[in-house]
Amino acid sequence: MTTAVLPRENYLNTDYRLRSWLLTTDHKRICILYLLTITMFFAIGGAFATMIRLSLVNPAGTLVSDETYNKLFTMHGIIMVFFFLVPSIPATLGNFLIPMMIGAKDVAFPKLNLASWYIFVTGGCFTLWALISGGVDTGWTFYTPFSTLSSNTNVSLAAIGIFIAGFASILTGLNFMVTIHRMRAPGMTWFRMPLFLWSMYATSLIMVLGTPVLAITLLLVAAERVLHLGIFDPSRGGDPVLFQHLFWFYSHPAVYIMIVPGMGVTSELIAAFSRKRIFGYEFVAFASLAIAVLGFLVWGHHLFVAGLSIYSAMVFSLLSYLVAIPSAIKVFNWTATLYKGSVSYATPMLYAFGFIWMFTIGGLTGLFLAALGLDVHVHDTYFVIAHFHYIMVGGAIMGYLGGLHYWWPKMTGRLYPEGWAKLGALTIFLGFNLTFFPQFILGYMGMPRRYHVYPPEFQALNVLSSAGASVLGIGYLIPLVYLLWSLKYGPIAGDNPWGAKGLEWTTTSPPPTHNFAVTPIVTEPAYNYAGEQEESRVG
Amino acid sequence: MTSQAAVAPPRALQHHFDSLEQQRDVATLGMWIFLVTEALFFGGLFTAYLVYRSMYPHAFAVASEHTLIALGAANTAILITSSLTMALAVHAAQEGNQKSIIRFLVFTFLLGTAFLVLKGVEYTVDMRDHLLPGANFAIAGANPGHAEIFFSLYFIMTGLHAIHMIVGLSLLVVIMYMTSKGRFSKEYHAPVEVMGLYWHFVDIIWIFLFPLLYLIDRHK
Amino acid sequence: MTSEHIVPKSTYYAIFIILLVMTYTTVQVAYFDLGPWNPVAALVIAFFKASLVVLFFMHGKYSSKLIKLVILGALFWLGIMLSFTMMDYLTRFMG
Amino acid sequence: MLSGIQLFPEEASTFAPKVDALYFFLVAVSAFFVVLIAGMLLFFAIKYRRRSPNEVGAPIHGGLLLETVWTVIPLLIAMVMFVWAADLYFQAYKPPKGPAINVYVLAKQWMWKFQHMDGQREINELHIPVDQRIKLIMTSQDVIHSFFVPDFRVKMDVLPGRYRTLWFEATRVGTYHLFCSQYCGTGHSRMTGEVIVMTPEAYAAWKAGGVSGDTMATAGEKLFTNLACVTCHNAQSGARGPILTGLFNQKVALTGGHPVVADDAYLRQSIMNPGSQVVAGYQPIMPTYQGLVNEEQLLDLIEYIKTLKAMPAVPTVTTSEPDGRAVPKSSARSLPVAPSAQR
Ligand code: HEA
Ligand code: HEA
Ligand code: CUA
Ligand SMILES: [Cu+2]
């Protein structure tokens, strides 16, 4: 940390030509490619959200037409879920960090990694094309028979776009799994791995096992539209609820694709900024796997009022409660880690606090939804909207931003401005709560989701929510601006600005193309801040 | 890859691996995981099939009698044989026998093509018999809607299987080309092996499709 | 897992013969009226055939524990999808 | 009644207070955990804040006791929630036996149609009496909709090709929002209406004034004649179709399939797709009426068939027995069994 210059040779400056970026197989450069792409998608998704909130200020819905409004929330959901949040942490931080954290030169299949990005971009283009050439209005859930028989928008095109992007997800997951299994440096046993890797492994598992089912489901929808096959068509005896089964077989586990990486980041942040080993390391590690496995057994909780058998609903509700337990374990272990730690209030740590808090609220309201008799009332109301935004915006995005700030010095070699960063974090936190807390109340009062016009008694809370969304939008702009600024003007960070443990901090910032000058040999467990000797264990 | 410069390690070794052993291991593991995703991909269709068969057993039985069992059975035999030749190609690769690899790959390719040709013939007959779901669909003895669901599944399942065959044939061509360039040896033949895994998997899918689509209630 | 297992050609031929015989059997069985056992027989045979392909043609039998786990994982998840979906359909009209 | 800023929905059905009780329990549990976790985070963060740049945390690895505690306690709480909520759900989704007012609900893009037994038809308005059990038999003509009355805390998706039954009992006179809560296309947010809960007297007056035609059963009977159903379904010996008297809710033996119970969905299917379920002993000669009858007429026909009890003729009561259990089991129809049925 003595020198105030960037390392002469690093992955960013080996070659400046565009070609060298577009044909790179370096996992760190691929991270940057993804970072740019998903930021763009976030901005698009955010623009739709802005329109939604603007329109909802007025209960009569005069700003846009009904059709337009329906397209707005559909495209907002599709873009935010499939093109922003699902790839967010895995494809950026995961790509950057997995090889570094296990002491490898690259992921197992570097070319495939690049191919995944191209596949992702292709899928994105299809979806954007669907959007520009008229939009889609099915909701991100594509329920049949509306999507197959009724809607006359670009459903097939959007479905194909998601289908294609799905393969990027599958291949990334596959790549990560093989990398973690086979590319670990000598001495890096499973139980010496940072918890971020456990969470990425769990996430990859879900991507690999769930995404193909989404792919085939959307393919069936497209086939039904284009080829007039009849799989879900009620007039031929098809069952629309079957579509929901297949869709949620992926899409429930997918919500864990979106949160588990954030949990992994939070584990890293909590450990690094309290300079302490995570309390109950093994429990947190196995909780990730438990979520991944149990997460596949609860999809029916989206179908409680949809025509599911009531007995089956009971089983799904029970299992939904069980899947909450590993999440609870994580939350408690993070909290306990702070005990007798050396807690710093750096911006990433603020995001970690935000994550835990917002995730707890979002998660606990998930218990309301898993409660059968209560879900009958709150299903498809703003209560659900608030639930998942608390987890996905309050939780996952805060985790993502926290991770981005924490590893920013490693990725770019420069520090972000701390004061501005704290301001940004605070603005986001306040704006977020102002936007989404009123929606819980709205939901319980009975305001249905996907409503363009609504009864006037809901207006006050909607206005409050829209006001919050403006604050939130500004909040997101702050990091965007100062992170860009720091690329050129930020102070040089040095190898390990946080005094953190972990292989990624042992190499230069930004790291060289092959990550490490020599392949590291690991001799201690993760987060060994106290410098303990390890009791011998075979991995 | 980029490491042509390195002299000592074998040419096929990519820069980020320590040994060919690791590289091969990684390739097979990757392929197996990919096949898991393929299994779940078809799994969605099998689920739909199971649901509807349990709802409409009668219509499925009647509709299934309209499939061409002779062609289906012949195709099953063809695919099994192609799996044998594929296995023998991998065997040849393990022994480093270039000529045998090519020979068995060509057999596999021809058998695969034969499968697709027969399938094409079958589709033509099916369409002639008004079994393609849509306006022209007609069937006697069963609820037409339910039978249409059967044939929707039939066409989707066999169609996706056929697409997998086509992908497999294209990959075969690539592997044949690589073999002819002398890329493979006793020590390094991971691509042939991985190709084999894929091919066998496509065979397995058919092993299930055949009884599910062709063999319901033939005894009537 | 380090040293590659080479399966003798004779094994491949033997498996091939069994597979053909099973194909013949499954077609023949379909023409007998076994009542509810027809689909069971067909699926048992299909499963047996698939297992042979996995174990021998695909070298599943000689692969590492990890790969065996991967194969079992696939079966497990397919099982979840089929059984939990059917759980709904089979209990819809109860009480 | 809807004035000012309201933060809580009215409790206007027997079900509502039960749901709210569970809700408050969940709110309390959540508040407890949110405060606990946020409080501990803040407390530790302040108490153990970093005091020197090179300070590190204490070497603590974990503790089995603590892990057990915070696994088991949430698990137990969660099980309480589960059982409580599942019980409520069964109450809501399993219609109780006993008398109820049956109303047929037909959803379509983007309106609600209600048909009362006595023949009143309404659009986007549902008049019901207070303190009486209402049973809705719901189907959709196109895509999925969802019947949602927040003040009653009830909701159920309405599916095409299926009949689903929702019940509730309003406890307060008033006008309540009806929403379609399942996204169904352009006009989804305009597919709203009102449930008007009336005193028994007002309801009786409304019913007397509002009759716009025949009762459903009568309308069904007319259709039964006009569509020539009677030519095959009649009591004469040698009739080509099975006699439909007392059919509803009985087990029917089918050719090539398991026996099924003749519920609403079965009747609908028998008329729209006769070939799909052929009664054992009969030839599949009944023509399909798909396209000839619309969903509303279908409901009339079904209601008519339901009223064909083994006993006298068309009853005119508004409170028909739910599930038609009035038919004694012993009076199950004698199915003419042709020799050919004994395969
Ligand atoms: C990242 C995303 C994410 C995550 C992690 C979750 C997590 C959970 N979700 Fe959520 N959910 C969504 C995203 C997410 N959800 C989305 C997008 C939808 C709507 C989709 C749509 O229809 O468009 C949805 C909808 C949804 C429904 C359907 C609602 C409806 O449509 O009617 C249900 C029902 O059970 C549900 C439940 C849960 C539960 C039980 C969890 C659990 O995993 C939460 C576990 C966490 C905790 C419980 C908090 C921490 C624990 C403690 C602090 C200890 C105390 C704990 C106990 C006492 C048990 N969710
Ligand atoms: C990851 C997922 C994600 C994220 C991040 C968000 C973010 C937001 N969402 Fe939403 N949302 C969903 C997933 C998500 N959402 C889903 C799945 C649905 C359901 C869809 C459906 O029903 O089908 C939904 C639905 C939904 C609704 C309900 C619509 C309805 O049912 O009628 C609302 C209403 O308020 C809403 C609001 C918001 C707001 C205000 C934000 C805000 O957090 C957004 C804030 C962001 C910005 C304002 C952008 C800031 C701009 C920049 C940082 C960049 C500028 C950049 C450049 C110039 C390059 N969302
Ligand atoms: Cu009908 Cu929404
Ligand atoms: Cu879910």
Image: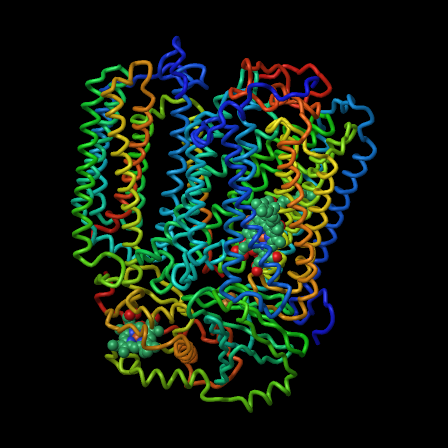
- Picture layout, residue A488 above or below residue C3: below
Q: Is residue A181 left or right of residue A198?
A: left
Q: Is residue A92 left or right of residue D245?
A: right
Q: Quadrant of residue B167?
A: top left
Residue found at the very far bottom of the displayed protein: D209
Number of residue marks? 0
- Picture layout, residue A365 above or below residue A191: below
Question: Is residue A321 in view from this perspective?
Answer: no
Q: Is residue D64 left or right of residue B88?
A: right
Q: Quadrant of residue C77?
A: top left
Q: Nearer the viewer, residue A42 or C34?
A: A42
Picture coordinates of residue D80 (x, y %)? 67, 50
Which residue shows up at 52% across the image and 32% down it?
A31
- Picture layout, residue B27 above or below residue D228: above
Picture coordinates of residue D243 (x, y %)? 32, 77
Picture coordinates of residue D149 (x, y %)? 60, 69
